[in-house]
Amino acid sequence: MPVKVGLISLGCAKNLIDSEIMIGHLAGAGMSMTPDAAEADVVIVNTCSFIDASKHEALEAIYEMSDGKATARRKGQKLIVAGCMSQRYQGALPVVEGAKGRVELPSVDAFIGLDQVSNIVPVIRKVMGGEAGRTEFLARTTTYIPDFDTPRVRLTPRHAAYVKIAEGCNHPCSFCIIPRIRGRHRSRTVESVVKEARRLVAEGVREINLISQDTTYFGMDRWTDVRPGPRSKVDSSKGESLASLLRELDQIEGDFWIRLLYTHPAHWSDELIETVATSRHVARYVDIPLQHISDRMLSAMQRETDGAYIRDLVRRMRAGVPGIAIRTTFIVGFPGETEEDFAELLGFLEDARFDRVGVFKYSKEEGTKADRLEGHLTDAVKADRHARAMLLLQRLSKERGEAMLGRKLRVLVESPGVARSEGDAMEIDGTVRVPRSLPVGEFAEVTVTGSTEYDLTAR
């Protein structure tokens, strides 16, 4: 009988691709997947540990799988903890640091890191063979990156896919632990990404979502003169870049969108803006976390940008790509944030009127530079500022929806009666309610007839 494997995938789309790669290798080895953890011989929990909330979610899943509450765990069933949490706490496992102190993980048979997703089959064979529990299969420094021919079973709808174009991050953001977990930035080649995208389009994919820790840094890790800070004059003459990748992807025949996710403001060049504007396939949409607008906060966050640069970049984007939808995120309650800093952020949100905005309360993460800063704010202050920001954003989003009435949109139908516009990314943005007769996985032209705070209705 083939080994039956259950998998719980937590966290972001980048983690989802790691899960897809593990499933691809399992399928190639003749192992079968099961959605019922109770009947699995091995359960894998692919964890996230970006912020404390994600660690809490991972710990809950691990405890649930280990104590049998949901799985009716039988004798001999194995539990493997994979992903960012294993990578982050290697050498200290099975102890994990949380907001409420140290937590010990129970009944884990093996821990694997980010470089072991392609070695999941031999790991399972070892734990199934009775090797000692709590074994760590971890590389201290991560170097792995998928290629166009990496075995993978997609977990997204048939018409949409994520493509990881790079791994790791070179940015020094003081609040972020990701560089320590996923290592230095390392890009795939343009040729590798284009081969994967061409195959996906041939399979019927209508939306390719380009992802990495910083998609705008693509190719630049191989340049010889990259310096920190904003670079509006960056061009492709120094080597491969996101702009050169987009131009090659744009040559692929077919009817599909290319969507840019996880871009960093410091690397948005004039060339990249022009490339988006002139492309046939690149969606007029950008995901660009800005995090704050106050110079004090941007400096403390080590974001390599300042308020004037951000305001000018938003202006240049909208002038260069008319109708572009901008999604961004901000952090409130960062150490040292004053009421004046927060008021400046609220004023910027009112003026800029972004299409989609996420606001997050600062999460104090051990091992980050921000953890050691003075001036940490109370949970009450952070919650108050988050609530005030969300109240403003709800009003702005409602006004945006009302302004869309009567507009014609091209949408991609996600499921019967539910679609997404060019300005809405999969799983994170709003939806458009459409007639159920429209075919799933295809584009359609609709007219907006109604709106709520975050979603639209169209005919």
Image (cartoon, rainbow, N blue to C red):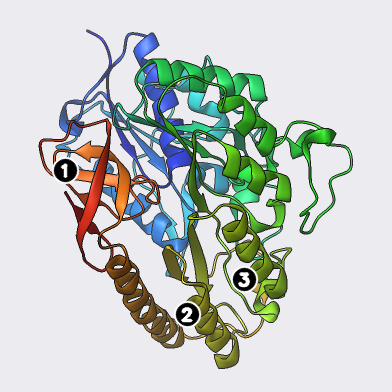
Q: Is residue 56 left or right of residue 279?
A: left
Residue 195 in view in this figure? yes
Q: Residue at x 51, y 46 (%)?
A: 261
**Label number found at residue 70:** 1
Q: Nearer the viewer, mark 1 or mark 2?
A: 2
Q: Which comes before the other along the chain, label 3 or label 1?
A: 1
Q: Residue furthest right?
A: 225
Foreground pick, 424 / 14: 424
Q: Position of residue 176 (x, y in %)?
A: 60, 59
Cβ atoms at labels 1 and 2 below 8 Å apart = no
In the image, which disc is placed on residue 287?
none
Q: Amino acid at mark 2?
A: Glu
Residue at left offset 24%, top offset 38%: 413
Marks 1 and 2 sit apart, C-alpha to C-alpha, by 46 Å
Q: Residues within 10 Å of mark 3 (few under 14, many from 20)?
A: some
Instruction: Give the SS element for disc 2.
Output: helix
Going by the image, does 238 lie left or right of 290?
Answer: right
The answer to whether residue 413 is above or below residue 334 is above
* Disc number for residue 371: 3
Q: Quadrant of residue 148?
A: top right
Residue 382 vertical position relative to residue 24 in the rendered view, above or below: below
**Mark 1 and mark 3 in contact (Cβ < 8 Å)?**
no
Sequence-wise first label, 1 or 2: 1
Name the residue rendered at 60%, 56% in the picture: 177
Q: Which mark is residue 350?
A: 2
Q: Quadrant of residue 207?
A: top left
